[in-house]
Amino acid sequence: MIGPLRLLGDWGMCTSEECPADFNGDGIVDGADLGILLGAWGS
């Protein structure tokens, strides 16, 4: 699981094809991915 610090470190446009913090696969690490992370927190 990617943690919040990794997600924030990868914030913005993905610079390579592999972008593990881009949970929704849109090529951008943003608020949508943060929402997915927070929704899964503790589960």
Image (tube, rainbow, N blue to C red):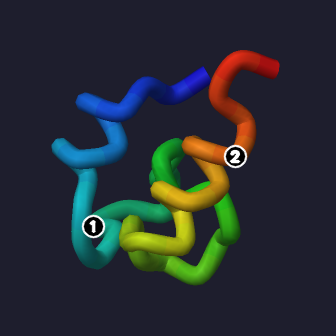
Tell me the tag on residue 15: 1
Total tally of numbered discs in the picture: 2
- Between the residue at mark 1 and the residue at mark 2, the CA separation in whole angstroms equals 25 Å
Classify residue 4 by image quadrant: top left
Q: Earlier in the sequence, mark 1 or mark 2?
A: 1
* Residue lying furthest left: 9
Q: Residue at x 64, y 28 (%)?
A: 41
Classify residue 14 by image quadrant: bottom left
Closer to the camera, 39 or 25? 39
Specify the amino acid type for callout 2. Answer: Gly
| Residue 19 located left or right of residue 1 | left
**Quadrant where the N terminus lies?**
top right
Q: Residue at x 39, y 66 (%)?
A: 29
Tell me the tag on residue 39: 2
| Residue 19 located left or right of residue 13 | right
- Mark 1 touches mark 2? (CB < 8 Å): no
Classify residue 28 by image quadrant: bottom left
- Residue neighbourhood size for the residue with mark 2, other residues' Cα within 10 Å, grouped as few (<14), some (14–19), many (≥20): few
Q: Secondary structure at mark 1?
A: loop
Closer to the camera, 39 or 28? 39
Picture layout, residue 5 above or below residue 16: above
Residue 10, percent from left and from top: 25, 51
| Residue 38 located left or right of residue 42 | left
**Quadrant where the C terminus lies?**
top right
| Residue 22 located left or right of residue 36 | left
Picture layout, residue 37 above or below residue 17: above
Closer to the camera, 17 or 37? 37
Specify the amino acid type for callout 1. Answer: Thr
Q: Residue at x 49, y 63 (%)?
A: 17
